[in-house]
Amino acid sequence: MKYDRIDKSLYIKNRAKFTQQMKPNTLAVYNSNDIYPISGDSTMPFQQHRDILYLSGVDQEESILVLFPNASNPNHKEVLFLKETSELIAIWEGEKLTKEAAFETSGIKTVYWLNQFDTIFNQLMAEAEGIYFNTNEHLRANTEVQTREDRFIEKYKAKYPAHHVHKSAPILHALRSVKEQTELDLIEHACGITKKGVHRVLDFLTPGVWEYELEAEISHEFLCNRSKGFAYTPIIASGKNACVLHYIENNMQCKDGDVILMDFGAEYANYASDLTRSFPVNGRYTDRQRAVYNSVLHVKKEAEKLLVPGTLIPEYHKEVGKIMEAELVKLKLIDATDIKNQNPDWPAYKKYFMHGTSHHIGLDTHDSGLYHKPIEAGMVFTCEPGIYIPAENLGIRLEDDLVVQAKGAPKNLMATIPLEADEIEDIMNSK
């Protein structure tokens, strides 16, 4: 791993929060992700399952975490199972966690090698009455590919059919949505790396460069700052491409007079940042581009004021929609007749602003959270309104990451990244 080791107190605290909500005499199991094959002997880079990472800090394949607060053996209340390391593995793959290193990482004292799992787990299940399985219940999840966790559930449900089955997901979604200070510091660090990427790309942006060249500049900056790279596939979208919400080809040349929408963020220690900025390719916004830009900026600033404890996300999105509606009228993109005749399920403003304004962010870019529960202090949200006008080859989106405070406005983790149109023009024309 490129990042500094995180203090194990975070994971000790996270496990305690989870086990406090478990039913009596139950255990919970968490598996690492697979290393996914591509073809031949090629694989995708390993990405740890965020839930086992949240609870243990173990960033290694073929690991299993078992939590059993009521275990008769005190050593079995928390157990890690790891792939056994060896000199051969160290030569071919690099060193894996030793039992001592696993303790320093996680705070878990009982560590077994993976080949002991079935024997130990059988003993634990003989005592337990129920089991918490870890299913992916994210509202946007693509669950077509069977994961290591899926295979585990299938196998052990059949092997232990008399045990009561419970879900980890609702507990973890609630816990992961409210960040500890250590997590907030890591997200802020990722935002700081993203800031460096923004300044690098502002120095490089000029008519004639290619979108992929800009992507390369950002990637270089991230890797130089101990990030694994992008927290998600970056969007580098100039001109009309900015009107495609998930444009990721990044293969067009940037033209004089266009605005380029760049949606990217660095990861650090598996924590994500998520930023969007819309820059004039030639260093100057036209009057129309600036008007649209300032409307998006106004909506963003007003939306941020609503990210306070007690707010319900569905109601928040409705309020942001009303603010956006007024801006679109000012821009003459919709009028009173459009509003009068609108479908309540798809308001008139949705023609130009068709996505949501905010989502949780943390270990995942679209992080776990319960959207039907009120916002709490310690939650981290994006705020990303946008206006997309295909007929004008213009798309503007602005996005920052914000920490909800107990009182007052949220803390903007990207507050020092250029945002105002004048500031952006000044930077671009001082090269």
Image (tube, rainbow, N blue to C red):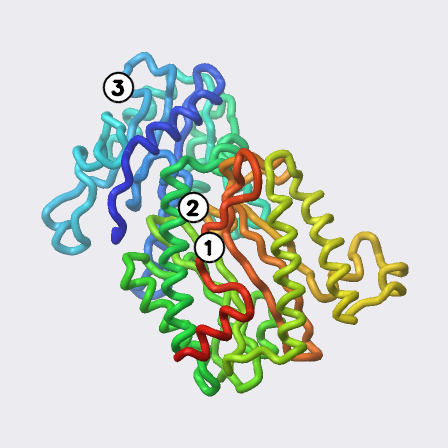
Residue in view at x 46 percent, y 48 percent: 364
Q: Is residue 33 left or right of residue 96?
A: right
Under circle 1, the secondary element is loop
- How many circles with numbers are drawn on the protein? 3
**Residue 71 appears in the figure:** yes
**389 or 245, which is in the foreground?**
389
Residue 325, given in percent of the width and then of the height, sits at: 76, 59
Q: Which residue is mark 1?
A: 414
Say which amino acid is labelled 2: Leu
Q: Which residue is mark 2?
A: 363
Residue 144, given in percent of the width and then of the height, sits at: 53, 52
**256 or 212, which is in the foreground?**
256
Under circle 2, the secondary element is loop
- Image quarter of residue 151: top left
Residue in view at x 34 percent, y 23 percent: 122
- Image quarter of residue 314: top right
Disc marking residue 75: 3
Q: Is residue 297 left or right of residue 158?
A: right
* Above or below: residue 25 compared with residue 83: above
